[in-house]
Image: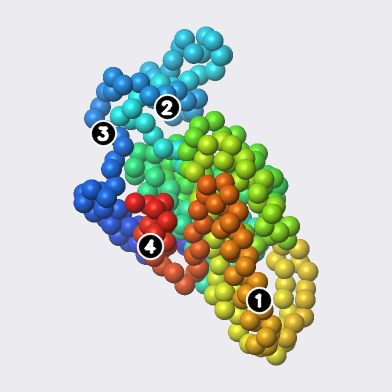
Amino acid sequence: MEEKIFNDDFFKKLQKIHLNINLRITKGLQGGRKSHAKGMSVEFSDFREYVPGDDFRRVDWNAYGRFDKLFIKVFMEEREGIFNIFLDKSASMDYGEKNKKIKALQIVGALSYIALNNLDRVNVNILEEDSLYEIKGGTGKKVFQNILKELENIEFNGKTKLSEAITKRKINSKGVSIIVSDFLCNDGIESLEKALKYLAYKKQEIILIQVLCEEEINPKIEEEVTLLDKETKEEIKLNLNYKVIEEYKKTLKNFNKNLETLAKKYGGKVIFSNTNMSLEEIILGELGKKRVIN
């Protein structure tokens, strides 16, 4: 990509977001759920499967003997949250004078930072066609730097079948699953239901973050335009008069209402964002309103 996405301005905004979240913690609006003390809590909480990077001393060898798999003991003081972030890299995300892909990448970067800074585990999954590939996840600063490096090099192209891709992600522990997309798919909003049903079955808290640009929210009146579907390459010539635009806005409003209804069906929430919004507005404002970030 020609434009550097994770630039000095991004890190300044990230620091501001971080300070605001810390301030909320000190005011008692958010309770930390872990101790930073070294050593183990005496209160056992749960098991989870071992992943590369875990402390090998926490392996439960009795469980390994029974299941022939490595499991880690998790204690109450140090119980970590697991965040599965899914990013739609379809061609439709590469659109707008203020480009949707830039805002989407910055949202993923910011959420990764917040979770990792809270000692949680982050897995970033890039959705491509009907499959996905995972950026090496885990915990700590090195993981964050690796996530940013990988995100910076993503090429947005083709089309994405969200459900087919997401359901290929193996999920073994309860956690939070966040999907970042415009959700503008040719198969209709119903095609997303399979993914949400799968995530709910896997005991995930579901968060959908929609990213749209100004041209999609408030198209300008023009005599004749050629609309190009960036995923299918289909072209349509259209007169964008007042009547057409009003009908379009009505359709978009109904689409988003149906998206919210579908998410609620599986206990999820929808965050509506656009490229005119600052990163602080989206993270501290919109996610705060929906209590995604307390």
Marks 2/4: CA distance? 34 Å
| Residue 56 percent coordinates (x, y) | 41, 20
The disc at residue 36 is 3
Mark closer to the observer (1, 3): 1
Q: Position of residue 271 (x, y in %)?
A: 49, 59
Q: Amino acid at mark 2?
A: Asp
Residue at the spot x=48%, y=20% of the render? Answer: 71
Question: Extreme left residue here?
Answer: 27
Q: CA distance from mark 2 to mark 3?
A: 16 Å
- List the residue tagged with mark 4: 285
**SS for callout 3:** loop
Q: Residues within 10 Å of mark 1 (few under 14, many from 20)?
A: some
Name the residue at 30% across, 53% down: 21
Indicate which label's residue lies in the foreground, 2 or 1: 1
Q: Disc 1 marks which amino acid? A: Tyr
SS of the residue under disc 1: helix
Which quarter shows the N terminus? bottom right
User: At label 3, which amino acid type do we have?
Assistant: His
Going by the numbered disc 4, the residue's amino acid type is Gly
Residue 229 location, quadrant: bottom right
| 16 up-or-down from 205: above or below | below
Task: Give the spatial CA distance, label 1 vs label 4.
Answer: 27 Å
- Pinpoint residue 31: horizontal percent, then vertical percent: 28, 43
| 171 relative to 28, above or below | above
Residue 41: % across, % down: 28, 23
What residue sits right under mark 1 in the picture? 248
Q: Earlier in the sequence, mark 2 or mark 1?
A: 2
Q: Which residue is mark 2?
A: 54
CA separation in Å, label 1 and label 3 = 52 Å
* SS at mark 4 in the image: helix
Check disc 2 and report its element: helix, strand or loop.
loop
